[in-house]
Image (spheres, helix red, strand yellow):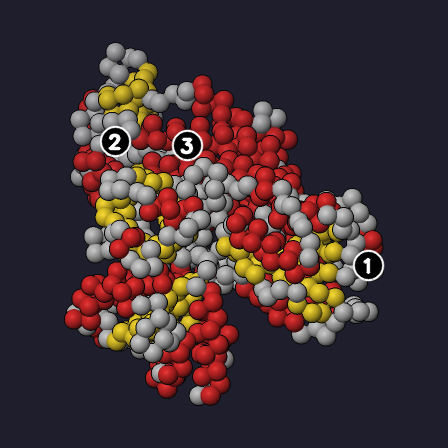
Amino acid sequence: MTLSIWRYSHLTLAISSSIFLLIASITGIILAFEPVTEQLLPYHIDEADEQSLGKTIEILKNKYSEVIDLKVDHNDFIAVSVITHKGESEQFYINPITGKKIGDLIKQKPIYKFAANLHRSLFLKSVGRFFVGFVSFLLFLIAITGTILIIKRQNGVKAFFSKIIKESSNQYYHIVLGRWTLIPIIIITVTGVYLSCLRFELIPEDRVKHEMVFEEEIPEKKSITTIPFFQKTKLSSIKSIEFPFSDDVEDYYTIQLSDMELLVNQYTGKSISTYNYSDVAYWNELSSVLHTGKGNMVWAIVLLVACINIIYFMYSGFKMTFKRRAGKNKNKLKAEEAEYIILVGSETGGTNKFANAFKEALIQSGKKCYVTDLNKYKPFDAMKHLIVMTSTYGNGEAPINAKKFESLFDESQLSETIGYSVLGFGSVSYPDFCQYAIEVDQFLARKSKLKADLELFKINNKSKAAFLKWVRLWSDKHQLELSIDESQLIKDRIKTKSFEVISKTDSKENPDQTFLISLNSSSKTRFKSGDLLAVYANEEEEERLYSISKNEDNSILLSIKVHEKGLCSNYLNDLKLTDKINASVIENIGFHLPKTKRGIILIANGTGIAPFLGMINETKAEANVSLYWGGRTEKSFDLYNNKIQYYLQENKLNELHLALSRERDKVYVQDLIARDKERIAEALKNKGYIMICGSLAMKKEVVSVIGKLCKAFELPDLEELEEEGFIRSDCY
């Protein structure tokens, strides 16, 4: 089955049952409070659980004129029906140790009675019960299809509970809460269907049948406390007792236990008849308890949370659907007339706004443009330029509307050579950042009739600034003046926390105008070195991401270069001690320190050293860590030198190699990598790790050198090493 089938099934089931599910969830929330409030009543006597049945019966018979029955309800409260010495018939809860009344029987409150009737049958009696049972079954299917979607998103069952990167609140909590409440929701649905089947007698009812055998001789009546059966049977094992009507030997006790019903001779305690309940009776009772939570306050609270989550799933699911539909591509021009074709791959519709903004800019410049999904590719008659904008689904997979693209492209042939560009959207928090865009770019590069206009361009976290940069590059290449309507690119802001400046160096003391700043959160914040801090210079601007180093005191350390027109770098540079900023930590799981003893090679230039400062501090002496750093002058490194020298002394860092482009031999980092190619090849051969952080230009040169040494030393190719996580990078 394809992903689209599961998604459309999930959505169709949700829409078709939404009203009934809403009613069932709201009434379920109300009913979940009933067992909780009942359990809080002080009617359960713990000390009585081990009291013998004979002792209880004796106490009751001495206390009341006549005892009709005794019942232990789902809360383990003991209720009796008695006739008092005044001749009055009463029912109430008792303390079985004393026999005294401790409370009146619980009467169902009107709100619970109303909610129960609405929940069970919608006030439509048998017809309503059928609908409720059917909706329970639909909810079961919704839970199953939702589970399949999560498994596909997480790239397998083993990764079902692995970390979810928070791209949007609705999507994130829809998945996270769905995973944690999956089991309770499935239990609710299965038991709901079961109870409906029981109501319509589709499941056979366990009818008790007795075959009584009486003793021919009338035995001598013994004291009930001396009869073995009544001595050994504990009150905690009893569900109910019907007392004999008289002292006649043929009148008996009818005693219900959890697994059987007994008719017991009141004179001897011997069984007159025994009926063992079938498995059906057990499942009937278990289904009722699991569906209602009666008798178990903790489970009732679980059911309450599950019902609340069902309502949230409806809200977030529909909101995601509306957002996806709102982002659909709209064209005024026919596809056959367009010279510029924009193909979009998007799981949630978030990429569409960038495609539509670019389309509008092309149309305003007088170009004929058409935008559609990758799955709708065909040999467009007038196409002269192809632009692919695509996100990545889950762990490196194609989005739902792009899975057929490669097969559709291979089925057709281009009549003339055209130019193409690929723009990837993703999050650096994922190990497979823009993986599908990489695959599409490689796929198109192999086609003889296609010529790349630009190299693959990747955009992190739907950055407006990065998109506009790509637009400028593309416009310059095609000699066009494009004006993008930036209002179409506004995205939801990440939830921020307050951070206080606790230390800061002066950028003027560094030849590269670089400074270190330490921040402390006012609330508990979890992060690791290599994660990212999203900082906003003002309300209107996009966030700027900085790699985090974790200080020894658990504060955040950033290394920042001040740029003349850098809005965010100047904003941070102007901060003073105790000043506060609003920012958000973004987990970057693909760039955390690996746990290994096989060696780690850290490669950075400029401020890219920041996350490595924290990572080196986390390493142990046997990790064998080497650091390669590139900068302009030795004084440029002074900012980090004290920490690095300390790490060298503590054997947390084994080697330091500086590549200075303006002093000494005037070399770059890639030159040192080429110089030490044998040692680096040996590290990779022994399953060691290489981590790269800094500028994209530096990464490109370093990766080129590593790619060559992989071939020279017969190592796995670069793509394989990156895919397996032995080469990790975080560059901009």
Q: Is residue 672 left or right of residue 128?
A: left
Does the rendering let one see residue 32?
Answer: yes
Q: Label 2 to label 3, Cα distance in Å?
A: 20 Å
Q: Are marks 3 and 1 in contact (CB under 8 Å)?
A: no
What amino acid type should be assigned to the residue bearing mark 2?
His
The answer to which quarter of the image holds residue 134 is: top right
Q: Which residue is drawn at the image coordinates 78% and 60% (left, top)? A: 383
* Up-down relation of residue 30 to residue 491 (above or below): above
Pick the front one: 423 or 573:
573
In the picture of the structure, the residue carrying the numbered disc 1 is 382
Q: Which element is circle 3 on?
A: helix
Residue corresponding to mark 2: 44
- Identified at 34% across, 36% down, the residue is 297
Crowd class of label 2 (few under 14; some 14 to 19; many from 20; radius 10 Å): some
Query: Residue drawn at (82%, 69%), measured in percent from left and top?
Result: 415
Quadrant in the picture for residue 682: bottom left
Judged by depth in the image, the label closer to the viewer, 3 or 1, is 1
- What's the residue type where badge 1 is placed? Ala
